[in-house]
Image: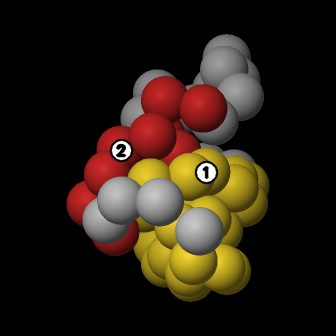
Amino acid sequence: MAKYSVALHGHAAVRVEVEADSYEEATRLAKEKAPKVRYVQSWTPVSASKLEEK
């Protein structure tokens, strides 16, 4: 598993760190882990960076 930093946008911006096997899984997990904010209906992944390989 690798550690990813995923930038999300949705009327606000947030960066979330997750551990995943692939880029696709990282973006999915990041959207689940993102904070629940009243004015954000859905988060859109903007970019993802692999931080380290485990």
Residue 34 visible somewhere in the drawing: yes
Assign the C terminus to one quadrant of the image: bottom right
Q: Residues within 10 Å of mark 2 (few under 14, many from 20)?
A: some
Q: Which residue sits at x=36%, y=59%?
A: 21
What SS does tag 2 mark? helix
Q: Position of residue 16 (x, y in %)?
A: 69, 53
Q: Quadrant of residue 50?
A: bottom right
Q: Position of residue 28 (x, y in %)?
A: 35, 44
Per the model, the C-alpha gap separating discs 2 and 1 is 10 Å
What SS does tag 1 mark? strand
The answer to the question of whether label 2 and label 1 lie on touching residues, with beta carbons closer than 8 A, is no
Q: Which residue sits at x=34%, y=69%?
A: 23
Q: Position of residue 5 (x, y in %)?
A: 65, 68
The answer to which of 54 and 17 lies nearer the viewer is 54
Query: What amino acid does circle 2 point to?
Result: Arg
Disc marking residue 28: 2
Query: Taking 14 as reference, is 29 left or right?
Result: left
The answer to which of 54 and 40 lies nearer the viewer is 54
Instruction: State which mark lies toward you, 2 or 1.
Output: 1
Is 23 rendered above or below residue 1? below
